[in-house]
Image (cartoon, rainbow, N blue to C red):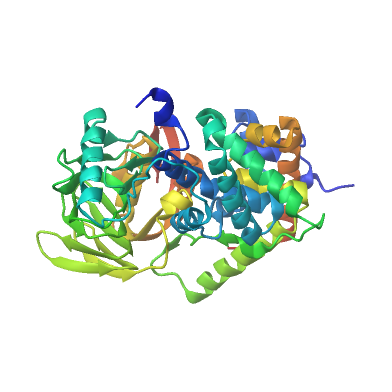
Amino acid sequence: MKAMKNDFFDDTFLARWMDSTLTKEELTLFKKHPEYLKYVQIKQVSNQLSFSDYNVDNAFEKFKAKKTAKKKTIVIPMYKYIGAIAATVILLFGIFTFYNSPNNYKTGVASTETILLPDGSEVLLHSNSLVKVNKNWGKDRSLELQGQAFFKVKKGKKFSVHTSLGKVQVLGTQFSVTNYNKDLFTVKCFEGKVRVTTPEKTLILTKGDAYQWTGSNNITWTFDQTAPSWISKHLVTFNKVPLSVVALSLENHYSIKIINPENIPSSNLFTGNYTTKDLDTALYTIFSTVGLKYEFSKPNEVRILR
Amino acid sequence: MSQKDENSLCNERNFEIFFKTHAAALRNFLIVKFSDSELAEDLTQEAFIKIWNICATVIPKTAKSYLFTIGINLGINKKRHDQVVFKHQNLIVSQNVSITNESPEFVLLEKEFADKFKQVVANLSEKQRTVFLLNRVEKKTYREIAEINQVSVKAIEKLMHKALQSIKKEIGDLKF
């Protein structure tokens, strides 16, 4: 007789559990199953699965080299700043774009947006973040950021990102900036060079360098990635960040409220990540590391249980 | 500029956005389908080139599904063998959660688990693996997977259920 523990109510049960479409009764029953935790582990690791990195920019360059030019119209080279004519055309395009589009960009809950700036630079805006772009982009490439974004800056004039805790200036590179109120300021440089200026210090980061201020500490470290994990793998990553700030970021992304945050041990520094695709798994990831149990007091409210 | 010209994929800027928006998803989908990341990347390039060459006749709304169809057909034409072993090197498990004072043994166990996990996934049957990867890595819903493969949602759910049972069985008692 087959062991009871391998039988489920039907042959789509686990699939529906993964998808969070089980009924309340089914879920309660499943949680009592002796193998339940094993399946949770599998779910968690599967959230961290991804394919090997694919550099889309390189692929595009490859594509451009391959395609044959069949069009008779003149193509404007956005990526070469070779002369006055090119620069003038680009500036005209810049004015045209601003005339037609807002200079404030805001993302909603759990969504990421790509903003193409007039000079061809790109901003990938993470959820619940805000960017205010300078109206006169041709003269001064500067913008304000609240939240988290990844920048791909085309070569050109100085490009500045201003946040409440510091500013980042670059000359053609790829980097990410995270700023949560006064609690966290993180800059990671993926390509080229950036200069970070805070009230206390100024430093230069090159590819693979990161700088972070967490309200009490400055730290720098090196890392090995080609793009932020929240873009390529739907994970938000932290390095030695107070657990309370990680919880803040989670509240922000999923638009939930933790009603008793004082129960989060403030001395624990968190190094790791949570998924941006599944609230239950994300909560489990964060709180299980310190053995905290929690419950939903309302659909959007979490209470930590002692 | 007329409305029609603004959206056309023959416009270099529009095409670039189209490329950068879908290239990674197409490449990953082709890895799932054809088990080979190098082949997938080549197929991705070829598919985009085909779309570029006929850009004037492509309707922006249906361009994405057209792109994927082309990619799949190119792959089917290229593949000489029916059964290809899925290379588990195609998969990566990103860094796990840890607190600052973890022991070296703990880190080792994590890596062991991750490696074993990747191997187990690679060893799933082709159908189970396809459903599992499309859902967990590419974040496709069961409905979307059903549509792509022209089967019922229930059939997909059954495959996912079986895949999870297989994984749990193979992973065995390895803890992490």
Of the pair B148 and B111, the residue shown nearer to us: B148
Q: Is residue A202 left or right of residue B149?
A: left
Q: How many marks?
A: 0
The picture places residue A281, in percent across and down from the top left corner, at 51, 45
Q: Is residue A194 above or below residue A68?
A: below
- Visible residue check, residue B165: no
Most extreme residue toward the front is: A72
Q: Residue at x 48, y 62 (%)?
A: B95
Give the quadrant of the C terminus of chain B. bottom right
Q: Is residue B39 above or below residue A123?
A: below
The picture places residue A169, in percent across and down from the top left corner, at 19, 58
- Quarter of the image where one finds residue B82: bottom right
- Visible residue check, residue B34: yes
The picture places residue A161, in percent across and down from the top left corner, at 20, 51
Give the quadrant of the N terminus of chain B. top left
Of the pair A20 and B25, the residue shown nearer to us: B25
Most extreme residue toward the right is: A1
Q: Residue at x 60, y 46 (%)?
A: B47
The picture places residue A235, in percent across and down from the top left corner, at 45, 51
- Quarter of the image where one finds residue B14: top left
Most extreme residue toward the bottom is: B104
